[in-house]
Image (cartoon, helix red, strand yellow):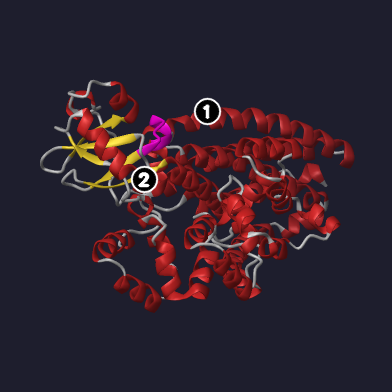
Amino acid sequence: MKDKQLKETQNITKTSTTSNLENQSQKNHYNDDELELIHIITAADDEIEEQEYDVSQIILDSEEEDLIDVIESPYAIDIAIAVEDFDDDEILSLSEKISAEHMAQIIEQADEDLQKRIAEILGISKMLTVFHHMSKDDIADILGNVPINMRKSILNMMKRKDTIEIQNLLLYEDDTAGGLMTTEFIALNSQLTVEKALHKIKEIGPKTEVIETIFVLNNKKELVGTADLRDILVEDNDATLEEIMYDNVISVTPEMDQEEVSLIVSKYDLKVIPVINRKNSLLGIITVDDVLDVVFEEQTEDILKMAGVGSDEDVENTVSKSIRMRLPWLVLNLFTAFISSSVVSIFESTIAQVTALAAAMPIVAGMGGNAGNQTLSLVITSITLGELNLKDDWKLVGKEISLALINGFVIGLLTGGILALRYNNIYLGLIMVGAMLANMVIAGVAGFLIPLILKALKIDPALASSIFLTTITDVFGFLIFLGLAKVFLPVLI
């Protein structure tokens, strides 16, 4: 799920100024060689070209100590981005130059395609060593993408306990809470005293992903509350976790869609959310950094779907893959275009007598489509945020009708006035006003109701809304405008 975010992060990181880097170097005590390496790796593409830097070669030629310090710095993600351009031999050379722990840090920051490629290059034996330094959920994500034979071999060679945990994580779909969760957390019995709890936290803490939130279980291993590490530190040693815990726990089930999880985390401003089963047993946790990945992924996916592009398409995809992902959508759009064309063909004789209609009719359809898309974007965003549903909010369509009437009248008046002056026919202008008003209202209603209806039918509104909206505004735009023109044909000739 990091694929698109990596490139976004790269753009953000590249805009860092020299003074920011120097401040960071002072804070982390980087030496001049390390600072220079950071400068090069985070430099903008045009700067790299101007200074003729070969980032791959610089990384491979750097001293091991300097490279490790950069990997452990906030700029480690830039190493992962640079590795995307490495060939197989360079990746192998880098893995031999740094420890398995530091290779794990690079792999964790890499996108899914690079993770799979690195795993295949390093091989089963070396990946097992790298996995010793990675969390179970990250391992599961990688194993979910590698060839099945490699996955089985690695799982068979791992400790039985680790294998069971990872296999359980692999059972869940990537876009569910179970696919997002990690099993590395601190869960303690509610009867433990603060003194004993602190001892356990010190013992378990280094192996977990989150240490500031402690999950409290009863004797049946059921989740009964959470305790903040800060509260534990300030309480008396004899106090029990049951006495200081928060018992109103917000949790999710492993089957819940990742988008719903992100809405819950956002709504309640959570840093971590537990994943439980029907018996209220704690299965894992989802951290806020994973939720941020989900938000970025879902937003990108919705934008691409609205444009008729596959959510996993990239500018670097092969031509054949891009054709497979785009062509079906274009064919569907071609079909709807023929529907609009058939409406126009009904009025061929009318257009032949008043050629100005041919120049004016695209304006009606186009403005209706634009107005509908404004409403559509707002509604899809509200649906994504959980703010709208068909059952409770369909009455808001009245507001869209009022808005469409006002916008349609203003736009229609402007367009009609221009057409009346251009063709010296006031009736053409009045027909434009009427058609614009009607199509704007249709566009507003359609833009509001289509995504709500699709959502109620369990169809992704971002995927299918735009094609329905475009068809409706085109068909009705042409039909109303040319229909009115046919009725008032005598005054137009």
Write the residue at 66% across / 65% down. Answer: 60
Q: Residues within 10 Å of mark 2 (few under 14, many from 20)?
A: few
Give the residue type that dot 2 points to: Pro
Q: Which mark is residue 203?
A: none
**Where 155 falls versus 377 (above or below)?**
below
Residue sitting nearer the eye, 201 or 421: 201
Secondary structure of residue under mark 2: helix
Specify the quadrant of the image occupied by residue 265: top left
In which image quadrant can residue 287 be found? top left
Q: Give the image quarter of residue 149.
A: bottom left
Q: Which residue is mark 2?
A: 206
Closer to viewer: mark 1 or mark 2: 2
Query: Left of 457 or right of it: where is 402?
Result: right
Q: Which mark is residue 399?
A: 1
Left or right of residue 461, residue 248 in this image: left
Q: Position of residue 165 (x, y in %)?
A: 28, 59
Residue 63 is situated, as x and y percent measured from the top left of the image, at 66, 59
Which of 2 and 73 lies nearest the eye of the viewer?
73
Count of all numbered marks drawn on residues in the image: 2
- Residue extent of the magenta highlight: 265-272
Residue located 40% across and 48% down the image: 258
Dot 1 crowding, Cα within 10 Å, few <14, some 14–19, many 20+? few
Residue found 32% across the figure and 49% down from its top: 184
Percent position (x, y) of residue 67? Answer: 62, 56
SS of the residue under disc 1: helix
Name, please, the residue furthest toward the left.
Answer: 219
* Residue at 32% across, 70% down: 155
Q: Report if residue 284 lies within the magenta region.
A: no
Q: Which callout, 1 or 2, points at the residue further toward the start of the chain?
A: 2
Residue type at the position of mark 1 = Lys
Q: Is residue 294 above or below residue 26?
A: below
Q: Is residue 19 left or right of residue 382?
A: right
